Image (tube, helix red, strand yellow):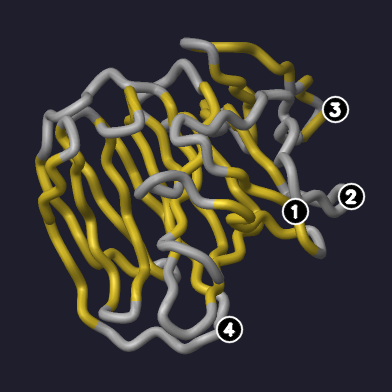
Amino acid sequence: MYINGMDIRKKYFNGQEINKALINGVNTLEVQPKIIASDSFNRADSVISLGKADTGQTWLSLDNCIFGINKNRAFLELGGPSLWHITLETRVSDVNIEVDVTFSTGSGGGLIFRCSSRNSYLDALINPSGLVLRKNVAGTVSTMGSYSFTPIAKAIYHLKVALNGDDITVFLDGVQRISVTEPYNRIATLHGLRASPYGAYFDNFKVEGLA
């Protein structure tokens, strides 16, 4: 591709694709965020498995729970003993994670991230009281931050978590609502979906590298 007679060539820097071009006499260097994992769930309905993400990673449950697919959305089909989450391996801990979530009255859903075992992880969850950011350390759960609002049943909420070193920022529908500094599980690379418990549906899951 050429702009003003200059050839735009794709290159890579620190594992991310860049486009370098001379436009109107100005040398530009644009780093495009790298999509590490994504899943639209646009495949056949299932009550036994999520299968593989669009980017090829296999969805894994650490809690013997079962997530399935219904009308191109993920949902919790069968819960484990007390936790309801499913993850995939990304091999990266500093990422942006996003999902669209909707749920029925009394339930909730969100994201689990920097997970190293069934009882060691962080999560951001929309529940009947609002939005909460928590950590689970060997089975002991504590709240790191929260934002109060009254979710509307069957409304679609866009949830995003930005992980950059010890800095964790949570966005709801594009607006920053929670920001904390937390070193726990800093290098864990399992990220995924969190239900609480039944009635949540997930769509447009994405894990993206930092630009």
Does 121 appear above or below 58? below
Residue type at the position of mark 4? Lys
Which of marks 2 and 4 precedes in the sequence? Answer: 2
Which of marks 1 and 2 precedes in the sequence? Answer: 2
Q: Give the numbered dot on residue 154.
A: 4
Q: Residue shown at 25%/31% (left/top)? A: 120
- Give the mark count: 4
Mark 4 → mark 2, Cα distance in angstroms: 22 Å
Residue type at the position of mark 2? Ala
Tell me where residue 106 sits by quadrant: bottom left
Q: Secondary structure at mark 2?
A: loop
Mark in the foreground, 3 or 2: 2
Residue assigned mark 2: 44
Residue 55: horizontal and vertical position, in percent? 72, 29
Residue type at the position of mark 1? Ile
Residue assigned mark 1: 69
Does 136 appear above or below 142? above
Residue 195: horizontal and vertical position, in percent? 46, 57
Which of marks 1 and 3 precedes in the sequence? Answer: 3
Q: Give the numbered dot on residue 1.
A: 3
